[in-house]
Amino acid sequence: MRQVVIVGAGPAGLAAARAARGAGADVVLLDSSDALGGQFWRHLPESRPSQHEKRLHHGWDRFRELRDSLEADPRVRIVRGGQVWAIETFAGVAVHVVVGESDGALRDREVFAPDALVLATGAHDRTLPFPGWDLPGVFTGGAAQALAKGERIAVGQRVIVAGAGPFLLPVAQSLASTGSTVLAVLEANSAGSIIRGWSRRPWELIPASGKGMELVGYAAGQLRHRIPYRTGRAVVAAHGTDRVESVTVAALNADWSPIPGSEQRVEVDAVCVSHGFTPRLELAVAAGCDLSGEGFVVVDDDQLTSTPGVYAAGEITGIGGVDLAIAEGEIAGRHAGGALGGAASARRRRRVFTGFAKRIEAAHGIKPGWTGWLTEPTIVCRCEEVTCGAIRQAARTTRSESLRSLKLTTRAGLGICQGRMCGRTVEDLLGAASTEGSLQDDASPHRRPIAFPLRLGELADPTRQLEHETSKGTQ
Ligand SMILES: Cc1cc2nc3c(=O)[nH]c(=O)nc-3n(C[C@H](O)[C@H](O)[C@H](O)COP(=O)(O)OP(=O)(O)OC[C@H]3O[C@@H](n4cnc5c(N)ncnc54)[C@H](O)[C@@H]3O)c2cc1C
């Protein structure tokens, strides 16, 4: 029987699992988290469920139906707490997994050699640095959202949400629903740029009218909680001794450079910042998949990557939201499962929501002037405590145009998070500081042969490697 392994049980992975089963394949669905649903359907643990979960999630019924049908299917093996730490493609595809609590001792190891692999590993949220962003009380929008949705914890009482993109709205909504007072949502792009980005060929938005209704829901929430939405503004510094006590908010030019004299100090006890998303590419890079110039996995019409037998779906192929992730997952799962053609409805939805993703980028994309709010002592790489000044100085002194050598010189991006937080920022700063204005090598910040930290004991102990066949069954 054909076996499909799917990495990631977010919207894309769940849809892929259902479609692969529909095509007749056996499915192994792996996720490092102990709950299914990914970022979009993150929820309270099943041991302490909420009566009100449905109110906090769009498409909650759809998620439950997907999850329940997969859990009830004896030919779907769901591995929760299964962290894929390496992928090899020497002779077919080998997927290396450790299973168990991420901070537990000696997790079990398994290796899968599927007929087809679907990568649906999603994205991290991206946060641009600013002076004081390393103070306690400064959260990424995604972290604040995860705490609100997954634990019902409010990050603070007086909170500002800042950055760029529609994701700021659900973050503000979740904060308000956990009892925070959200003082404002600050979008860095100007109202004009947002309107231009969204209003090109408006008739093409009609098939995505469900998204419009979602937006109306968020707008109504903003009004109900009296949260102002202000454009062309950013948090450009955070201040405090032991934790954040206030922030500086500045008006921005169209390129996001701060307008001198526009700064205002606002007292807060937390700030949530998000500037879009960065795809989680380490497994795709390990599998040898080609990336586009914009840094996403390149796929063909069937979601097949450049590596035979490896498909990709969801945020790793482009940032487009939950509906695009589901449509891509359906197509990838169906073809990975061995079906030929078909999936007409998913292909139509993919076309509609790919257009939607382009609008998000046009309306809310990052502009280069943000480096204007950095000072020389601003920490850029938090793990290795490398400052903006140190990065610029290394680029000037060594005159190197190689990302790899500049990273080795400064250690930026080489700490425990392996550049997941700062990688793109370091790349941008080094690129801007290099003599040519861009980097000359193809070193990828996503190339990590061991994708996640692994204990030497786990790697060395052959008894930890489970016999694939003896460990079947839902965990
Ligand atoms: C922090 C965060 C919060 C978000 N919250 C919202 C929101 O509230 N509303 C909204 O509209 N959009 C939200 N988004 C955007 C949202 O992620 C997408 O629209 C949608 O969830 C994408 O689906 P996906 O399946 O591609 O990825 P995800 O939903 O991100 O799913 C990817 C899954 O892959 C798993 N994974 C990754 N790497 C590995 C590995 N090596 N081994 C095993 N498992 C792995 C992850 O644990 C995760 O469960 C959020 C994004 C982020 C990053």
Image (cartoon, rainbow, N blue to C red):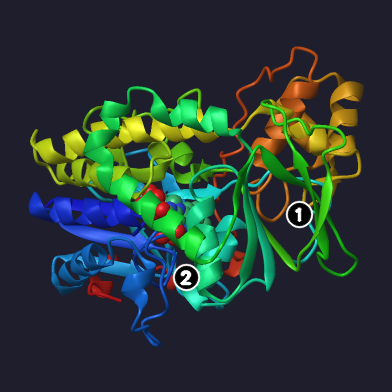
Q: In this view, does 458 lie above or below 264?
A: below
Residue 82 point in image, percent of width and height: 41, 65
The reply to whether callout 1 and callout 2 are in contact (CB within 8 Å) is: no
Q: Viewer-proximal residue, 360 or 354? A: 360
Q: Residue 226: in sight, yes or no?
A: yes
Residue 105 point in image, percent of width and height: 56, 78
Residue labelled with disc 2 = 149
Q: Residue 121: in sight, yes or no?
A: no
Residue 176 point in image, percent of width and height: 54, 69
Can you tell me whether the CB of the residue at mark 2 lies under 8 Å from the nearest atom of ligand 1? yes
Residue type at mark 2? Lys
Q: Viewer-proximal residue, 304 or 214? A: 214
Within the image, what quadrant is residue 51 found in? bottom left
Residue type at mark 1? Cys
Q: Mark 1 against mark 2, which lies toward the viewer?
A: 2
The secondary structure type at the circle numbered 2 is helix
Residue labelled with disc 1 = 383
Residue 445 point in image, percent of width and height: 61, 37
Q: Residue at x 44, y 64 (%)?
A: 32
